Image (cartoon, grey):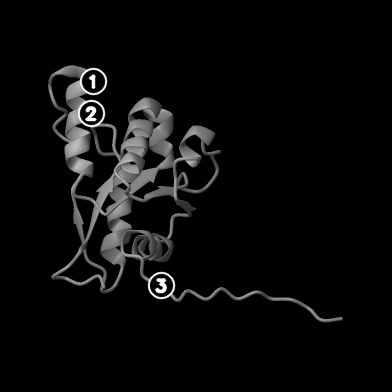
Amino acid sequence: MISQSDPVRIFVGHYWQTDDDYLRVFEYLESARNFFYANSSRPEPRPDGGREAEREELRRQIAPAEAVILVASHHRRAPELIEFQARFAKAAKKPVILMMSFGGTSVIARDLQVLADTTIDWSERALTQALRRYARKEDTARWDTIDFKLD
């Protein structure tokens, strides 16, 4: 059960800077009622020492997380870095929640899609339910309505 005393620990993928999509993830989480989280991602400052220093810092940031949230638009900007985050999460047995590009107009790269446990739209409900299901293994009790016509 996610509570203030036991928040879900997350890592939100980044490419060593914040952008609108990175910040939007937190806007969605903050707008969710009775949902508590602790963020281990730190996009700034970028570590000195090149690619291996960056990867080591990402490993350190991802390690305490229960789930990794990646944003598809970041993959277009830094594909190698975002795929590294997804591969490390999978190696560490952490679920990867992939958020489509905001507005859902872009195609998600297959290399990234195969690493995700689930792909969701930009929705506060979809995000919190994915975290409950994949990070905490909670049944979300989400019911979808299907309309059909009998002839």
**Residue 48 percent across, percent down from the top left:** 12, 21
Please state which amino acid type lies under the numbered disc 2: Arg
**Residue positioned most to the bottom:** 150
**Residue 53 percent across, percent down from the top left:** 17, 24
Residue 141 image-quadrant placement: bottom left
When the figure is inspected, residue 88 is found, relative to residue 123, above or below; the finding is above
Q: Foreground residue, 67 or 23? A: 67
**Residue 13 percent across, percent down from the top left:** 30, 41
- Packing grade of label 2 (10 A; few <14, some 14-19, many >=20) is some
Q: Which residue is mark 2?
A: 55
Picture residue at 60% right of the left edge, 76% below the top:
145
Q: Foreground residue, 89 or 61? A: 89
Picture residue at 36% right of the left edge, 65% below the top:
137
> Is mark 1 in CB contact (under 8 Å) with mark 3?
no
Q: Is residue 121 left or right of residue 67?
A: right
Q: CA distance from mark 1 to mark 3?
A: 39 Å
Tag of residue 123: none
Determine the secondary structure under disc 1. Answer: helix
> Is mark 1 in CB contact (under 8 Å) with mark 2?
yes
Tag of residue 51: 1
> Is mark 3 in CB contact (under 8 Å) with mark 2?
no
When the figure is inspected, residue 142 is found, relative to residue 91, above or below; the finding is below
Please state which amino acid type lies under the numbered disc 3: Asp
Tag of residue 139: 3
Mark nearer the N terminus (3 vs 2): 2
Mark nearer the N terminus (1 vs 3): 1
